Image (spheres, helix red, strand yellow):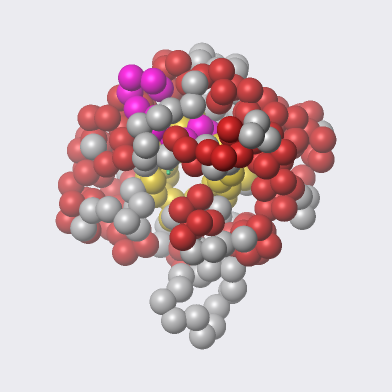
Amino acid sequence: MRKKIVVGNWKMNLTLQEGITLAESILSSLTGIDDNRQVVIAPPFTHLTAIGSLTKGAAHVHLGAQNCNDNASGAYTGEISAAMVKSTGAEYVIIGHSERREYYKEDDALLARKTSQALDNNLKVIFCCGEPLEVREAETQNDYVEKQIKAGLYHLDGAHLRNIVLAYEPIWAIGTGRTATSAQAQEMHAHIRAVIASQYGKDAANDITILYGGSCKPSNADELFACPDVDGGLIGGASLKAEEFLGIIAAITRAQKQ
Ligand code: PGA
């Protein structure tokens, strides 16, 4: 049975004190997370240790970073290595978010190296993919996302794939209030699962968690999470308010086990 996961990606928001307050209010109201579900909180690097000391005591709640460098260590001023992330207690790292692809020009080859660094340091990777609006309008989104997955992940063997979570985030839905319909999400998630199956086999494809991201909120989470191939969400804006994030977590606890 594959895991259902809700990830809160705080992006570059909240001071350390604000982050601690938010994490405390999420954790104090969290209920109903069973062994087959997880919550991941991904604050900025500067907050990892402090938030990690709060998540450590909470069952099924994990800590994640939003990025790591593609080198093991060295003269890369201002950068953070996968080993450093791991040493804070984090278990996950988000790689390939569209904001990093676009604003920091992170290309497929770099993301493949970052993924390997993260896995070499025993982090689980939340690997993001998703098409811009013009690709969706041209109806070539399936090919676009397939190329991102092949370029970012196909160098991995099947054992490494077990430490990958995929996140499909159509760029036109991120922070825009415009969510993909559940039909659009399901269609792409099924395609992504088929792309994984073609390289790693049906069992691996069936086991991999595929999250949806892009304006997911309590009011649409139930419908999205009811799709057979949508295994949870990568949440930006709605993860910054305890009540909204808890509402999305409640939706994943209601989603059918499969
Ligand atoms: P959003 O962001 O929920 O604010 O649309 C999602 C993401 O970028 O991970």
In the rendered view, would you say 67 is above or below 83? Answer: above
In the rendered view, would you say 242 is above or below 118? Answer: above
x then y, percent, for residue 243: 23, 30
- 36 left or right, relative to 245: right
Image point 49% across, 64% down: which residue?
Answer: 104
Q: Residue 215, located in which quarter of the rendered image?
A: top left
x then y, percent, for residue 238: 31, 35
Image point 40% across, 62% down: which residue?
Answer: 88
Can residue 160 be seen here? The reply is no
Is residue 70 found inside the magenta-colored segment of the image? no
Number of numbered tags placed on the structure image: 0
Seen from the viewer's position, the closer of residues 25 and 7 is: 7
Quadrant of the image for the N terminus? top right
x then y, percent, for residue 33: 40, 27
Image point 40% across, 30% down: which residue?
Answer: 178
x then y, percent, for residue 163: 63, 46
Image point 62% across, 28% down: which residue?
Answer: 189
| Span colored in magenta | 211-221
Q: Quick check: which quadrant has ligand 1?
A: top left
Seen from the viewer's position, the closer of residues 112 and 72 is: 112
What residue occupies the far bottom of the structure in this picture?
A: 75
Can residue 171 be seen here? The reply is yes
Quadrant of the image for the C terminus? top right
- 216 left or right, relative to 257: left
Q: Residue 164, located in which quarter of the rendered image?
A: top right
- 257 left or right, relative to 8: right
